Image (tube, grey):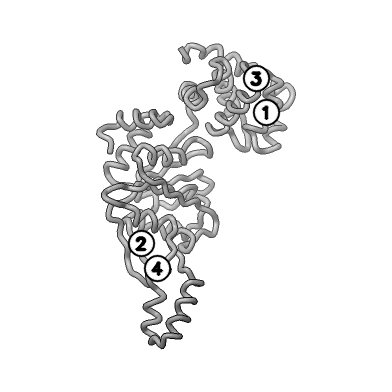
Amino acid sequence: MFDSVNSVQQTLQGQDYIAERGLATAIYLALRLGRPLFLEGEAGVGKTEIARVLSGALGSDLIRLQCYEGLDASNALYEWNYAAQMLHLRLLEASGASREEMQAGIFSREFLQTRPLLQAVESSVDGQRPVLLIDEIDRADEEFEAFLLELLSDFQVTIPELGTIRAGTPPVVVVTSNRTREVHDALKRRCLYYWIDYPSFEKELRIVRTKAPDVEPLLARQVTAFIQEMRELELFKSPGVAETLDWTAALVALDQHALSLQTVAETLGVILKYQDDIDLLSGDSLQALHERAIVQAQTNAALVS
């Protein structure tokens, strides 16, 4: 798919995703070795976007499994269409079918409703590999992690009534975690691991200019500097890159050309989602943060040249 790490970086950049060489190397090796890629980091740093970008770059389908507490096989792998089975069973009874014929008839593929994991295993056509995103695995239960081991090891799933189904060509698998809890080592061992950290000033500025090309250069620097300074505070939830882009879009929508203290105060709810964090940035503390951001933006002005 890619002949080098550089080609991965260039392709991602063509999809408007700025990736450092370490991440590009992890992606390249995951594709080359046919291993799942486990991405960990704070919320909003671009983990999920990797799967979307890869899907676009490879021209393949994106199959997403959003994890949550209580997720089980019936939601992730497959489920029987019980209503259709009951109707078919009554038709078989009316036709005088034997017990064995009825049992064989209702547990067939026509009554199987596929879910994301089974779709990913069966979606490989003529060597085209779908991208399977298992998003926020840390939100699922440990029992579900154990259930995933067979898939991540052998790219196969077992349905008791039908047997084992194997992928003709293994899908590209991206697993993400916000680290709200530790994921078991058994799952991590089956993956290549990469931690996505908050970006540096230069990288985040490039992301802002790439995703919001209409933003004024001065405003882009000031927004980036303000977010960078904000992450140094002891907030309950520091803003991620997603919040940076949301805030930039909001400021552009307000027809702002530079970051004023009043505008910051009026739009804090775009980047902070907890009232305690908003209360922390009130009065003098917000003014001091704004002043530091303006100075940092001026100092780093050469980065946009």
Give the side of residue 273 with respect to residue 153, left or right.
Answer: right
Look at discs 4 and 1 and give the one toward the viewer.
4
For badge 2, the amino acid type reads Val
| Secondary structure category for the residue under label 2 | strand
Give the side of residue 219 with respect to residue 123, left or right.
Answer: right
Q: CA distance from mark 3 to mark 4?
A: 61 Å
Query: Which residue is pictured at 61% across the width and 15% down the height?
Result: 294
| Secondary structure category for the residue under label 3 | helix
Look at discs 2 and 4 and give the one toward the viewer.
4
Q: Are marks 3 and 2 in contact (CB under 8 Å)?
A: no
Look at discs 3 and 4 and give the one toward the viewer.
4
- Reading the image, the residue beneath label 1 is 267
Q: Are marks 2 and 1 in contact (CB under 8 Å)?
A: no
* Label disc, if present, on residue 290 of the rendered structure: 3
Q: Is residue 4 above or below residue 147?
A: above
Neighbours of disc 1 within 10 Å: few (<14), some (14-19), many (20+): few
